[in-house]
Every structure is written in structure tokens, then in C-alpha cells.
Image: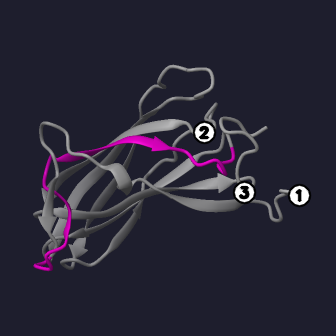
Amino acid sequence: MSNTRLIAADYGDWRWAGSAGAPPSSPAALADVNGTGILAWEFTNGESLHFPDQQLPHNYSEGTVLTPHLHWMPSTTATYTGTWTLEVIYHLNITTGTALSAKETTTIAFNSAMTAFQMQTSNFSATLTGTNRKISSILHARLSLALSAGTSCFLNGLDAHYEIDRLGSALITSKT
């Protein structure tokens, strides 16, 4: 059976929320979501969260961009003004041991009236480059929130759309 693409481009959703961790200073904190007893990462002004060891899947079309977006919600009904910032570094190629890349930064600016615990889905202002990026590339990221109005925001998920070129890889560390 051939592993050939049937349409011009297929896309997948790559979730980053699995191994989030708080840094030693200015960390987001796990907090109760609206008295439910369920915890989520809550950000106030200047807080951040780290996402170490995120690995690109084997069906990733090597060299294509990643389009990150954020699922989040405000903790109170109010006007919220601020910026989410995502900073990413990554290993370009695991088979050659390529050194970490330069840091890429993208943002989401917002300024609007919001309802408490109503889901927001926001796209970052720029895609992340795919130049020389291979399957199993490891990414490290930091997500930060700067608020000038509003109290706090809960993170529901950080993920990125990526292009798929086939079901997976023929070998463990390469497409061929």
C-alpha cells in the first residue's frame, strides 16, 4: 500500500500541554477553575510556564512551519488588555546532533471585554520557522503573560498546527 498524499496538504494538531512545568521565578500556578475542584495553570501579570521536551511527530512534513495557537479563559468578567508571548528554541536534527537554534518569539495581543471562564482561542502573530526542522526535533518553549488590565487567565492548552506529508516515518529517526 502506498503512503501517498491524497490532497494538497493535510494538517494535524500537536498539543504542548502534556509536560508543562513552572520555572523557579514568576511561575504560573495550578489553581481551582471556578470552584470545580479541577486545576489548571493560572497566569497573573508577569508569570510564565515552561514546556520542555516537546517532540515533533513522525508524520510532520519536514521543513514546514508550525502555526501555534492558545486556548485560554479569563478568571473574571472584565476588560482584559495584555500580551501572551511564546518563546521557542529547538534542536534542528536529532540524527546529527545539531546545536540548539536561535530563539523564535511570537505574541498574541488582546484588548476586549471578556466573560469569566469563557473560552478564547487565539492565534499567535507569527508562525515558527520550519527551516531544517526534521521529525523528532525537540522543542523547548516558554509561555508568558503580561497584563495591564484584568486579573488572571487560565491556560486550557497550547498547541500548533503542522503539515503532514504521510502517515509516519519509514525509519526511527528519518523519513527515508
Disc 2/disc 1 C-alpha distance (Å)? 26 Å
Q: Nearer the viewer, residue 110 or 13?
A: 13
Q: Which residue in the protein does label 3 denote?
A: 167
- Secondary structure of the residue carrying tag 3 is loop
Q: Which residue is mark 1?
A: 2
Of labels 3 and 1, earlier in sequence is 1
Between circles 2 and 1, the one closer to the viewer is 1
Q: Residues within 10 Å of mark 2 (few under 14, many from 20)?
A: some
Quadrant occupied by the N terminus? bottom right
Q: Amino acid at mark 3?
A: Leu
The residue at 27%/52% (across/down) is: 83
Q: Residue at x 10, y 63 (%)?
A: 151
Q: Which residue is mark 2?
A: 130
Marker count (numbered): 3
Residue flagged by tag 1: what amino acid is it?
Ser
The three-letter amino acid code for the residue at tag 2 is: Gly
What whole-number distance in Å separates the C-alpha atoms at marks 3 and 2? 19 Å
| Residue 87 visible to an observer of this rendering | no
Residue 29 placement (x, y as % from top left)? 14, 54
What's the magenta region? 34-61
| Labels 3 and 2: the sequence-earlier one | 2
Q: Quadrant of the C terminus?
A: top right
Residue situated furthest front in the rendering: 172
Q: Quadrant of residue 110?
A: bottom left
Q: Is residue 51 magenta?
A: yes
